[in-house]
Image: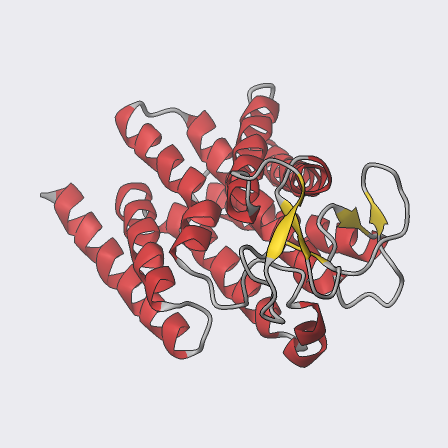
Amino acid sequence: MELLSQLAVGLALAGLIALVAYRRGSLSRSGALGAVLIGATIFGLGGWAWGTLLVVFFVSSSFLSHYKEQRKAALAEKFSKGSRRDLAQTLANGGAGALIVIAHALWPSPLWWAAFVGAIASVNADTWATELGVLNRARPRLITTLREAEAGTSGAVSAAGTLAALGGAALIGLTAAGFDLAAGGAPARALALAGAGALAGLAGSLIDSWLGATVQAIYLCEACGKETERHPFHLCGAPTRPRRGWRWLDNDWVNFVSSVAGALLAAFLMGFA
């Protein structure tokens, strides 16, 4: 009964947050459904600590998605989707975390908590890097060749974006450490968790960029000749054709894979703490 009650509370909280986000334009209808599924699972099985990390990610990333939105509008053609997250995006960002909390419920271990911190830190870092990095007036460079690229290009990084990624990851790590301390955990281990979350989140964000520069599906608009993640049509209405990468590996899969990488790294680091 206690588990059912916790799941019911998680469902109610997730539903409320999804409704507010939908009305504010941060989620589409399918995105709201995804947020409810992910949120109810994490809140219901993990409790307040796990659920709060998800909320910190969602609130901070949603705020940054709308920050200076008009300046970012010119780059919308580069990205596969807009600022309203849909079902695939919510599952890509929160799916690894939901699987981790399910695994923790079935086979309890403190390393699952570390893995969860790494997964959420990775998606938060990537979102912060994207939303703040594209506002940098200096041209970014491809992570593979260090050649200059247009803002918004998949796989392009900048000093500003990297610092933003570190800040987003550190926020998740510090929040998790705060919960550990509040629960009576050792300060040294809490500090290690904060560091592991920051490092794993930053690494996950860089892995995301590397995948974007190498194997993510990128298309070319046949009318304006610009690279884009959009398929089968560009924002201008013209069809797009494959330019490089694996056609099945879109940005949503890249986000999911990078969050799994962040989870594995954080768990590995905390295994030595």
Choose top left, top right, bottom left or bottom right for residue 190: top right
Image quadrant for the N terminus? top left
**Who is closer to the viewer here, 5 or 16?**
16
Which residue corresponds to the image point at 34% horizontal and 61% vertical from the top-left? 30
Residue 34 in the figure: left or right of residue 117: left
Q: Nearer the viewer, residue 208 or 182?
A: 208
Above or below, comparing residue 202 to residue 153 in the picture: above
Q: Position of residue 235 (x, y in %)?
A: 60, 69
Q: Decide: is 133 above or below 22.
A: above
Q: Position of residue 16 (x, y in %)?
A: 29, 69
Task: Please name whichever residue, 51 or 246, is drawn nearer the observer in this view of the structure.
Answer: 246
Q: Residue at point 47% right, 51% down?
A: 53
- The front one of 72 and 182 is 72
Residue at (32, 71) in percent of width and height: 19
**Residue drawn at the location 63% of the way across and 34% of the way down:** 196
Q: Can see residue 185?
A: no
Answer yes or no: is residue 226 visible: yes
Q: Quadrant of the C terminus?
A: top right
